[in-house]
Amino acid sequence: MSNRRLSLEEAQALSSGSDHYTAYVGPPREYDAMGATQFMLLCTLGLRAHHRLLDFGCGSLRAGRLLIPYLDSDHYFGIEPNPWLIEDGIQNEVGADQVEIKRPRFLHHDDFDCSAFGVDFDYVLAQSIFSHCGPDLIERGLAAFQRSLSPDGLAAVTFIHPEEGQDPAPGEGWVYPESVTHSVSSIHELVYDAGLHSLAIPWYHPRQTWWLLARTPDRLPGRDQLDLLQGAVFASPR
């Protein structure tokens, strides 16, 4: 039986990965806060209305519902292999009128290719994508980002690190809704092999670690700026 028509209140009891637009992308009780923290991070990093942004694995527009109205028309791009997620996100969160005004562009595929849009991106967002990918898919994703980032572009992505004393469990292929873990050293190696530079930042995430990727190290925040990239949350979602 499908859960897609459940109310927001009813969907709160669903587990991550369930077929409701607020649950498929993560814990439904965090749907609002996780979208907001991504938006705040990007704005803190310099995202402005005139920039072109790729929301890689945009899901049900958890972040897109804030990014689409913020960005200029034709400047939000989303890739999501499950069309129903975008459909439900538009119906319940964004609205058809706003789509008509802002003209976001979407692709539905799972081959980790960003080139079909035919533009270079100032920002790429990939939240909770590589946390479900083995190294084979991460390599493809990072290579795609390297090709599609503008010379001064910045990508914000998340990984899960193993707990202290535990070995990494990188998995293989796409394992959603299960998660995988990658060591800091392996992440640096994957990013380096893709021709990018990386920096882990302390921006708040309840389960993962944010990393920034750029073509040149000068585009990454300096060590003196990391204290400003905390994204502290003073009340956990309930």
Image (cartoon, grey):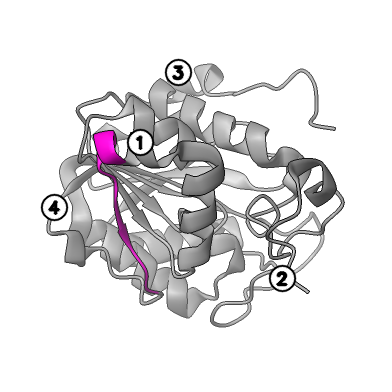
Residue 195 position by quadrant:
bottom left
Q: Are marks 3 and 2 in contact (CB under 8 Å)?
A: no
As rendered, which of 92 and 71 lies closer to the eye? 92
As rendered, which of 233 and 25 lies closer to the eye? 25
Q: Are marks 4 and 3 in contact (CB under 8 Å)?
A: no
Q: Are marks 4 and 2 in contact (CB under 8 Å)?
A: no
Q: Which mark is residue 224?
A: 3
Please tell me which of labels 4 and 2 falls first in the chain: 4
Name which residue type carries label 4. Answer: Val
Name which residue type carries label 2. Answer: Glu
Rounded to the nearest angstrom, the CA distance separating label 4 from label 1 is: 25 Å
The mark lying in front, picked from 4 and 3, is: 4
Name which residue type carries label 1. Answer: Asp
Q: Is residue 60 visible?
A: no
The mark lying in front, picked from 4 and 1, is: 1
Please tell me which of labels 2 and 1 falls first in the chain: 1
Q: Which residue in the structure is indicated by mark 2?
A: 178
Q: Which residues are magenta?
A: 100-109
Q: Which residue in the structure is indicated by mark 4?
A: 119
Please tell me which of labels 4 and 1 falls first in the chain: 1
Please tell me which of labels 3 and 2 falls first in the chain: 2
Is 104 included in the stretch rendered in magenta?
yes
Q: Position of residue 120 (x, y in %)?
A: 16, 50
Rounded to the nearest angstrom, the CA distance separating label 1 from label 3 is: 43 Å
Q: Which mark is residue 97?
A: 1
Rounded to the nearest angstrom, the CA distance separating label 3 from label 2 is: 36 Å
Pick the quarter of the image with the C terminus.
Answer: top right
Residue drawn where x is 62% and y is 37% of the image: 34
Q: Is residue 213 above or below residue 167?
A: above
Residue drawn where x is 52% and y is 35% of the image: 38
Please tell me which of labels 4 and 3 falls first in the chain: 4
